[in-house]
Image (cartoon, rainbow, N blue to C red):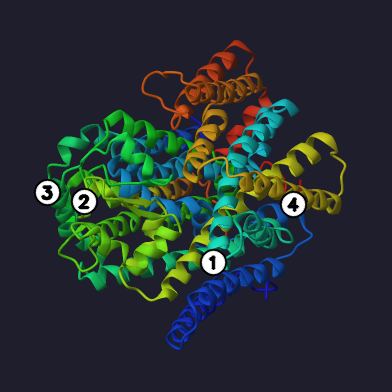
Amino acid sequence: MIKGNFIDNLPKVYGIYTGGFIAFIIIMSIAEQMGMTSKTIGICFVAFTVAIYAIIGYLSRTAQADAYYVAGRQVPTVFNGMATAADWMSGASFVAMAGGIYFKGYGYMALLVGWTGGYVLVASLLAPYLRKFGCYTVPDFIGTRYGGNLSRLLAVIVLTVASFTYVTAQINATGTIASVALDIPFQYAVYVGLVSILLCSMLGGMRGVTWTQVAQYIVLIIAYLLPVFWISNKMGAGFFPHFMLADEVSRIAELEAQFGFVKNSAENLKEVPKGLAGITKAHSAVNATPWAFISLALAMMMGTASLPHVMMRYFTTPSVKAARKSVGWSLFFIFLLYSSAPMLATLSKLSLIDPSLPTGIIGKSIAEVQSIDWYQNWNQANLMFVSDFNGNGTLELNEFFMGGKAVVLATPEIAGLPYVISGLVAAGGMAAAMSTADGLILAIANALSHDLYYKIIDPKAETAKRLVIARVLLVVIGFAGATIAAMEIQGILGSVIWAFDFAMSGLFFPLVLGVWWKRANKEGAIAGMALGLISGAGYLIWVRNGGSGFLGITQLTFGIFGSAVSLVSMVVVSLMTSAPNAATQKMVDEVRVPSGKSILGKQH
Amino acid sequence: MSKQAQHWEKTRGLLFMTLAIWFVFSIGIFLFGAEMNEVTGPFGYPLTYWFTCQGSLGIFVILIFWFANRQEKIDEEFGFSERGDD
């Protein structure tokens, strides 16, 4: 399949694939009507999609360095956009984002703005220039632009710290979904998830990951949009929810005013299972200070532009021009999901709290709510809880608790959609988490194999040996990530945000100034990366251990402090030491124009 | 001034313009989030709410495509565009 004019046939190949997937959904819904159990449907969805990814991964196997590292630099613009969108949208975006919006409202929306606005920085400041450079990895750019093994090594360290923080959360998410869908304990499910992830990337490297990510994007976007549209239509909220939910949004505000946000006593809250929350914040009102919103958005934007697994996707386009356009397509495909998350949160919240809707539970008697089928299911899954704190026998807004994941996972069932949709959502969540985990593990393994092993330790290694090392590292890093994920020490969303802060602390300014400031030199870059990462991490540790912080910078936005230190130290040290030599200056000039040869050769 | 320096000057000009628009819709408007939310925005949503759900996100998508086209024109103008691809 992946031979000859495969690239020309891409629209056809993925068209057939999409048709096949839709046919599979229809077959499953017929099977459901004929009495297939929900458990079997869940298993079918996850097993079928993972099997397809594994086949694509196998067909994409390669023994060439440039195919392994940058998919042969021939991924067309639109398809690279889809792959980037899948690479980008993690288990957290898929499963947790709508829940975050549901519970935290405006304060959380900063993440939506940040995780999209960052692409403007990627497109204008970095992606086209790094594509022109012709590097295989992000440290490859740092190492060549600034020169010296130390700068390369520091870039590898920052990359590893940021990506590894991120990847454990993704493996954790694949484990969660696999354990629910396949009904096996989480400790084993994590490794099932890991094996699925490695099947996509082991043989084909970047090439395998690219073509599986496109397939995963198609699954995850169908799995996200279909329920949103279906629920909206079923509730009579509007045929195209994005443009038609204004009444629902104002109805929620009305109900909020009617119920009020009653604060629960600490004693009552002790009853509530860990991880569940009540509705305590207004849905559409501005409930955060401007700086709280802006600082979080800014940290996410700069983090986006520094995360290597995203940047390296633009190394795979055929040209500089294509890299720029491809960033636009990536954001378009991300926009499709991100703009739907607030709509899902609105539909989910209204269907639960509006007493005039048949699904509404607020105002019903506690006993009645406790006898509802879906309540019992999700209560058992530890994602829903009610308790009669004031003893009046009726459920009040402050007496209803839900887990963040339930917004995506449970809303289809609450709205009365067939189980096949829940199976589809599980497959979508699995696709989202797998595609991000693949991108991250590959970014780390490639940096270690290409930059640390080949460029620093053994520059004479042959291609075959390099690729064996790359694959061994892939497996080792995957297992390390899975082992940490199995310990369940951190929440999914918190560690994702930390990854952005780490990346921006160490890499944002060394990358940007490498292109935009000719005077930036090796010493400056080394200071910028080392001091940025150390001060960012130091600030995090300080705040985590009860430090008060300053300027309203929290443990979620510590990258703002880290990157400020990075910028200042990089500029000061660069100016104190001698300017880069003529060859380096000429190299920067060449990077700045799209035409001509790339700085690093096709095979390096 | 050499062709390359002129090209870079225009490229930098475009960057500043792009970043200015980016700044307005990612940071600027949220300085006035509370005030703006009193206004009814497109499709009847509160204005700030609409920007966080769709507005800013959609503007970023358009901004990147606009930027890419403008940059291509600049590259062509100075003869720095790549030949024979996409």
Vertical position of residue A589 compared to residue A549: above or below: below
Residue drawn at (16%, 44%) of the image: A260
Mark 1 or mark 4, whichever is nearer to me: 1
| Three-letter code, disc 1 | Ala
Give the number of the disc on residue A181.
1
> How much space separates mark 3 and mark 2, taking CA atoms?
11 Å
Quadrant assignment, res A346: bottom left
> How much space separates mark 1 and mark 3, taking CA atoms?
39 Å
First in sequence, mark 1 or 3: give its number.
1
Marks 4/3 same chain = yes
| Three-letter code, disc 2 | Glu
| Three-letter code, disc 3 | Gln
Q: Is residue A319 left or right of residue A425?
A: right
Question: To which residue does mark 2 refer?
Answer: A396
> How much space separates mark 1 and mark 2, taking CA atoms?
32 Å
Camera-side residue: B11 or A85? A85
Question: To which residue does mark 3 refer?
Answer: A258
CB-based contact (under 8 Å), mark 4 and mark 3: no
First in sequence, mark 4 or 3: give its number.
3
Chain where mark 4 sits: A
Question: To which residue does mark 4 refer?
Answer: A475
Image quarter of the N terminus of chain A: bottom right
Marks 2/4 same chain = yes
Instruction: Give the percent coordinates (x, y) of residue A62.
Output: 76, 62
Marks 1/4 same chain = yes
Mark 2 or mark 4, whichever is nearer to me: 2
> How much space separates mark 1 and mark 4, taking CA atoms?
24 Å
Mark 4 or mark 3, whichever is nearer to me: 3
First in sequence, mark 3 or 2: give its number.
3
- Tell me the SS state at disc 2: loop
Chain where mark 3 sits: A
